[in-house]
Amino acid sequence: MLKWLLDIGIADEAKYDAYYEMISEVAPYAQEKGVVIILKSHGGNALTTKDTIAVCEKVAHPAFRICYDPANLLFYNKGEEDLFQDLDRIASLTEVVIIKDCVFEDGVPNVRITPGEGLVDFDRILGCFAKNGFEGEMYVECVRGDELDEIDQNLRKTRIFIEDILAKYR
């Protein structure tokens, strides 16, 4: 059964209103079918935390929530996004959290690293989400590695890293 429909917003500002209208029309049907549309930051009308919150609040339907990806917020905002501004508010609107990290190498963003090795402060973010009652899903999207053994090792490392953080808030 389908649980979520991932949406990445829209880049063309001239079409923002049509997008809001379309999502507002589709959300009740999604809810009827037991599906939640989750908006993930990928630029456009979901470029920043504030933008993503504004989209969610404009649609204002329980079947339209956020897929919070702090690494994408850093990636698309060239490291200038303040991940802690409005963190309580975005936590209350979030359905899914992406576990992915981000670094900048010579000004170029890189998310092919293992969570905990970059700029995302998972302890502070997940602590805030726990405080706000978040009980949704978390997905690991990227880890460092080119070979299967290295990827597996970094996935295990990530699982332990996140479990250790979450244990502090249970």
Image (cartoon, helix red, strand yellow):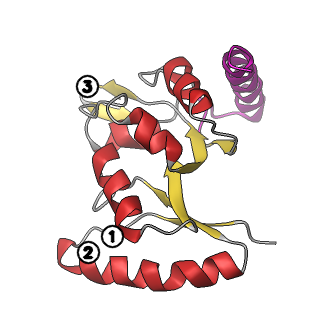
Q: How many numbered callouts?
A: 3
Is 34 placed left or right of 123 in the picture?
right
* Residue visible at 31% across and 31% down in the picture: 85
At mark 2, the secondary structure is helix
Q: Quadrant of residue 63?
A: bottom right
Q: Which mark is residue 23?
A: none
Q: Quadrant of the C terminus?
A: top right
Q: Is residue 155 found inside the magenta-colored segment of the image?
A: yes
* Residue visible at 57% across and 42% down in the picture: 98
According to the image, label 3 marks what residue?
106
Near mark 1 (Cα within 10 A), the count class, few <14, some 14-19 or many ≥20, is: some
Is 75 placed left or right of 96 in the picture?
left
Q: What's the CA distance linking mark 2 and mark 1? A: 7 Å
Q: Is residue 31 found inside the magenta-colored segment of the image?
A: no
According to the image, label 2 marks what residue?
16
* Residue visible at 75% across and 35% down in the picture: 148
Please report whichever mark, 2 or 1, sits nearer to the chain's N-terminal start: 1
Q: Nearer the viewer, mark 3 or mark 1?
A: 1
Is 88 placed left or right of 161 in the picture?
left
Is 169 placed left or right of 106 in the picture?
right
Residue found at the far right of this picture:
1
- Range of magenta residues: 142-170
At mark 3, the secondary structure is loop
Please name whichever residue, 110 or 43, is drawn nearer the observer in this view of the structure.
43
State the image coordinates of residue 142 (x, y, percent, origin top left): 59, 38
The vertical placement of 132 against 63, above or below, is above
The reply to whether dot 3 and dot 1 touch (C-beta < 8 Å) is no
